[in-house]
Image (cartoon, rainbow, N blue to C red):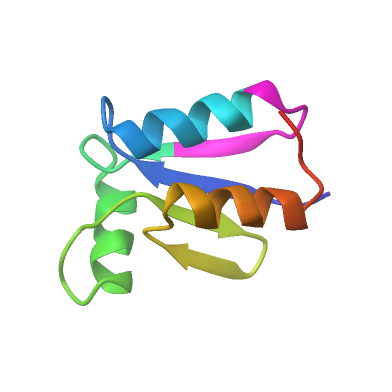
Amino acid sequence: MMKITLYGKQGHAYTVAFKNFLNSTDVPYTYKDISKDVEAREHSKELYNGVAKFPTLFVDDQVFLTPTTEEFNKIMQDLKLRA
């Protein structure tokens, strides 16, 4: 079973779109809002040299830093995930 985690922020367009896609699949995932989750925010800062950026997508051991919609869609296709 793959492990998917998404860091984002409430109301942020990419975050909302990525969450909507993931919600429409059968794959469980973890969502962390970096404006509310201190641990996720600190982890985000480590990934982006001291700046908390988003969205960040984690798939098993892979980390995708601020993927665009096109990149996100390609990752989902590679994982064979369909909405």
Given the current orientation, which residue lies at the most extreme bottom position? 49
Residue 25: percent from left, percent from top:
72, 28
Q: Nearer the viewer, residue 70 or 22?
A: 70
Is residue 28 inside the magenta stretch? yes
Q: Residue at x 28, y 27 (%)?
A: 10
In percent of width and height, residue 70 lies at 51, 52
Q: Residue at x 30, y 61 (%)?
A: 44
Whether 13 is drawn above or below 51: the answer is above
Q: Is residue 16 left or right of residue 29?
A: left
- Residue at the (23%, 65%) spot, across then down: 45
Q: Residue at x 27, y 43 (%)?
A: 34
Looking at the rendering, the stretch of residues picked out in magenta corresponds to 24-31
Residue reaching furthest to the left: 51
Residue 3, x across and y down, in percent? 69, 51
Residue 26 or residue 80, whichever sits in front = 80
Image quadrant where one finds the C terminus: top right
User: As rendered, which of 50 and 26 lies closer to the eye?
Assistant: 26
What number of labels is visible? 0
Q: Position of residue 68 (x, y in %)?
A: 42, 53
Image-based side of 6 in relation to 12, left or right: right
Residue 54 lies in the magenta stretch: no
